């Protein structure tokens, strides 16, 4: 397991549930996958999942915590499964906010594997209108921005809804999706955002074609799971439709 500040980040038994869910709905939705960027993702598992797709020519991972990257390489090599050594990967130990500000690259998909934007979190400054506008500006036409987006349990979904409301100011399609992650002991939420494609509405043939091209064996994600991810419980649909706080 990887534990930071007392909070479970991932466990070997089920980390693929989280990482396959974060990566593959977004990559299945885009028509081009040449260039991908990951914000966060220190243990390398998100990088691993991106590089399972043979269409990806380059993937940049930007994580502020070099110690986590080093510890994961040494003690958790199963998470990255060689992804750090893949010639298509570029790892930057640095501030994702500075990268978004300074980079002139545009990406087919941007994946945010940052910690939750709690007030005392170093990720908090990356969840606001200015940053989301920068992210959108770094997307290629037709691109998708996907992010881990806090819990979706009945008693603790307010932060997720706040993130969704903020992102709706920037993207035409903002789709919530949810799965249970046993190591987190709760339902975990994600968001898929785009001006060009509704990730929740992808055709089964598109998903089957995408999954058929992935290298290695998936544990969790396929076309049937995709439909399940985006089938939200009634309480969450109601919460997402209500007016409320945004960043």
Image (tube, rainbow, N blue to C red):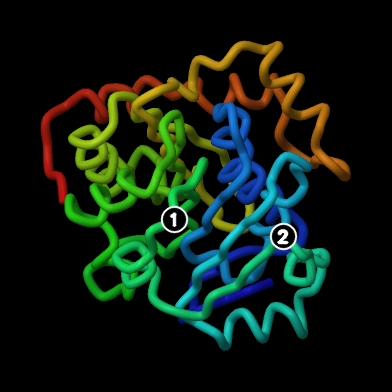
Any mark on residue 145, and which? Answer: none
**Gap between marks 1 and 2, in whole Å?**
16 Å
Which of the pair 20/215 is nearer the observer?
215
137 left or right, relative to 29: left
Taking 210 as reference, is 97 left or right? left
Q: Position of residue 104 (x, y in %)?
A: 38, 59
Label 1 close to label 2 by CB (< 8 Å): no
Considering every residue shown, the one lying at the far front of the view is 104
Q: Along the polypeptide, which appears first: circle 1 or circle 2?
A: 2
Which image quadrant for residue 58?
Answer: bottom right
Q: Residues within 10 Å of mark 2 (few under 14, many from 20)?
A: some
Total marks in image:
2
Residue at the (56%, 65%) spot, across then down: 61
216 up-or-down from 26: above or below: below
Q: Nearer the viewer, mark 1 or mark 2?
A: 1
Q: Residue 223 at x, y = what percent?
A: 70, 21
Q: Relative to 4, does residue 212 appear above or below in the rendering?
A: above
What residue lies at 63% left-to-right and 50% top-to-bottom?
19
Compare residues 144 and 18 and report the one nearer the observer: 144
Helix or strand or loop: what does disc 2 sit on?
loop
Percent of width and height locating residue 156: 33, 47
The picture quadrant where one finds residue 235 is top left
Percent across and percent down for residue 34 are: 62, 43
The residue at which mark 1 appears reads as 105
Quarter of the image for the N terminus: give it.
bottom right
- Where disc 1 sits, the SS reads loop
Residue highlighted by disc 2: 88
Relative to 114, say whether 135 is above or below. above
Front one among 179 and 134: 134
Residue shown at 30%/62% (left/top)? Answer: 117
């Amino acid at each position: 397991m990887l534990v930071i500040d007392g909070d479970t980040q991932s466990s070997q038994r089920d980390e693929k549930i989280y990482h396959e869910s974060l990566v593959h709905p977004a990559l299945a939705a885009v028509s081009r996958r040449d260039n991908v960027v990951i914000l966060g993702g220190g243990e390398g598992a998100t990088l691993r999942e991106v590089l399972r797709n043979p269409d990806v020519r380059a993937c940049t991972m930007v994580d502020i915590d070099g110690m986590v990257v080093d510890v994961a390489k040494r003690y958790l090599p199963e998470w990255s499964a060689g992804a750090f050594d893949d010639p298509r990967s570029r790892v930057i130990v640095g501030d994702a906010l500075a990268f978004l500000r300074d980079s002139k690259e545009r990406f087919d998909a941007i994946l945010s594997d940052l910690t939750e934007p709690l007030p005392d979190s170093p990720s908090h400054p990356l969840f606001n209108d200015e940053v989301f506008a920068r992210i959108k500006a770094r997307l290629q036409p037709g691109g998708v921005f996907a992010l881990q987006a806090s819990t979706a349990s009945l008693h603790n979904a307010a932060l997720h809804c706040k993130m969704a409301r903020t992102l709706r100011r920037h993207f035409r399609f903002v789709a919530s999706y949810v799965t249970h992650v046993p190591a987190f002991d709760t339902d975990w939420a994600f968001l898929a955002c785009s001006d060009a494609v509704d990730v929740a509405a992808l055709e089964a043939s598109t998903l089957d074609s995408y999954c058929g091209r992935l290298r290695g064996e998936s544990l969790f994600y396929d076309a049937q799971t995709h439909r399940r991810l985006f089938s939200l419980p009634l309480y969450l649909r109601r919460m997402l439709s209500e007016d409320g706080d945004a960043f």
